[in-house]
DNA sequence: GTTAATTAATAGTAAAACTATCATTTATGA
DNA sequence: TCATAAATGATAGTTTTACTATTAATTAAC
């Protein structure tokens, strides 16, 4: 699977960038080091000036690829969810049993990225940390409705929709498949965050992953039989 | 209940502010209009200069109460969760049946604030909108561990802990009471957000509230009998 | 009614978040 | 391979943010 995924280009909505960073060497360096720098100093402290310095390039050059750092964050989250979607599709397409399929899907979307799969220039481990710590800032803005209309969050919504459909396949009587699917995706990021920072309010830790918690949750809610 | 709650002072960790805004008229005006202004223009666009102008006062005066706008946000979220905690305690303390108690607690923490209860100078409807849209920014920072050690998030964690304990009372065999409690509190905010902005990925709407979804979820997970 | 505390007004700084211009390097294709 | 276009780099400049410092004016307290 790793090899198959290696050569896939994750496609991101063209409106998010001014110039496709995948189209040039500089663009790739910008994305590569933006990920490392945001992970290192946090999104609030991240600036294009610092990024320019880090890649031995210029602030103004970065501005030719992304309007501002918010758009860059939207780009990174969109890329991440697109990448997760590929993993999900690959990991589940050969599974015919709906229950097994759903559980595998949950495993994929709730799992944290442990080692860099070297998908081109992108460090997925660092990117995953950014998604946990920063991604909600990409939509928690006053511009969310305009940007949503422009399609900035399509990949994310499509991923949630895929899980919703799998839930419905398992139990068509369940009344809240969409809410459950969005709770799993958002909730997993939240559990990952609090297991690292607010340990007292979660049961997740090194041994019990958010995956285990959410699979158990879904098994209970949808009345999946034990021997799946 | 409304009258009882009216005279309670929600206490916020002293380290969060430089000078207690509840102690002076100006302080109250700062908090009152900060809530309205952040709700209006969003946290990113909010500045102490704009707030000073709005209250006919000075930027420098605001700085005497709060170090910066981040601390002000921490203050507001802490106040909100303290206020919610009072509601939860009042609404549940007379209920002896653990299952009914838990469901009432979930109702309280997942419900959106529909009308201003006029708790002194604070507009709870606007504040609730801020909690939905901005509150996660208060802990999604590089300083989260330091600030957590200083007790900035104690009220929030205590509220989650109360729900965790209620869950355990209902079903002591359930393995993830903490994760479930935190999922409910965080997940409810998320459902409120997406029902307003990403309608395609939720089943919540004007008729189906996040409360209904989460109560059903908990009933299923903890095997609560129907006639509660 | 004096003194202390609080608030208001003003000014100033450093950095962020850009925009604009022009020089230089690199790529393309006739 | 030379000319031209495109991309990048360097520099400078603007506005706004996020403060700090100082002093003046109010208000409160004893």
Image (tube, coloured by chain):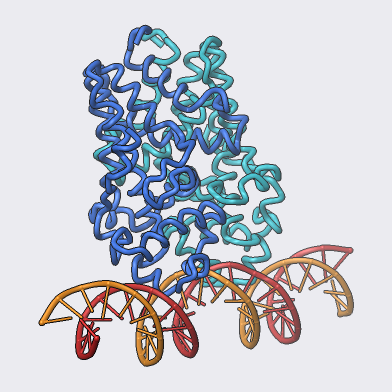
Chain colours: A blue, B cyan, C orange, D red
Q: Is residue A68 toward the left or the right of residue B84 in the image?
A: left
Relative depth, front residue between A37 and D5: D5
Q: Is residue B130 visible?
A: no
Q: Is residue B21 toward the left or the right of residue A111 in the image?
A: right
Task: Name the quadrant of the C terminus of chain B.
Answer: top left
Q: Count the numbered circles shown.
A: 0
> Does A179 appear above or below A148?
above
Q: Quadrant of residue A164?
A: top left
Q: Is residue A20 visible?
A: yes
Q: Residue at x 43, y 58 (%)?
A: B42
Q: Position of residue A121 (x, y in %)?
A: 40, 52
Q: Residue at x 46, y 22 (%)?
A: A212
> Does B162 appear above or below A117?
above
Q: Position of residue A176 (x, y in %)?
A: 29, 26
Q: Residue at x 34, y 66 (%)?
A: A65
Q: Quadrant of residue B84?
A: top right
Q: Position of residue C1 (x, y in %)?
A: 86, 80
Relative depth, front residue between D14 and B2: D14
Q: Residue at x 22, y 18 (%)?
A: A96
Q: Position of residue C19 (x, y in %)?
A: 36, 80
Q: Quadrant of residue A189?
A: top left
Relative depth, front residue between A93 and A106: A93
> Does B141 appear above or below B188?
below
Q: Is residue C9 toward the left or the right of residue B181 in the image?
A: right
């Amino acid at each position: 699977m790793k090899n198959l995924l290696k050569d896939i280009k994750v496609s991101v909505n063209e409106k998010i960038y001014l110039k496709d960073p995948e189209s040039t060497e500089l663009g790739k360096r910008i994305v590569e080091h933006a990920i490392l720098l945001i992970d290192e100093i946090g999104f609030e402290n991240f600036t294009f000036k610092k990024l320019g310095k880090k890649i031995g390039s210029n602030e103004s050059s970065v501005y030719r690829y992304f309007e501002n750092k918010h758009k860059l964050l939207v780009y990174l989250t969109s890329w991440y969810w697109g990448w997760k979607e590929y993993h999900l599709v690959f990991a589940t397409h050969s599974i015919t049993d709906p229950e097994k399929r759903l559980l595998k899907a949950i495993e994929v979307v709730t799992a944290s990225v442990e080692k860099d799969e070297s998908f081109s220039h992108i460090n997925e481990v660092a990117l995953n940390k950014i998604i946990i710590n920063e991604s909600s800032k990409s939509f928690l803005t006053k511009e969310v409705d305009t940007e949503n209309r422009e399609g900035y969050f399509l990949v994310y919504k499509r991923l949630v929709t895929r899980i919703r459909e799998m839930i419905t396949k398992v139990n068509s009587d369940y009344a809240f498949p969409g809410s459950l699917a969005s709770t799993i995706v958002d909730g997993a990021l939240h559990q990952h965050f609090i297991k690292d920072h607010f340990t007292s309010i979660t049961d997740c830790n090194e041994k019990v992953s958010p995956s285990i918690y959410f699979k158990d949750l879904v098994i209970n809610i949808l009345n999946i039989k034990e021997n799946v």
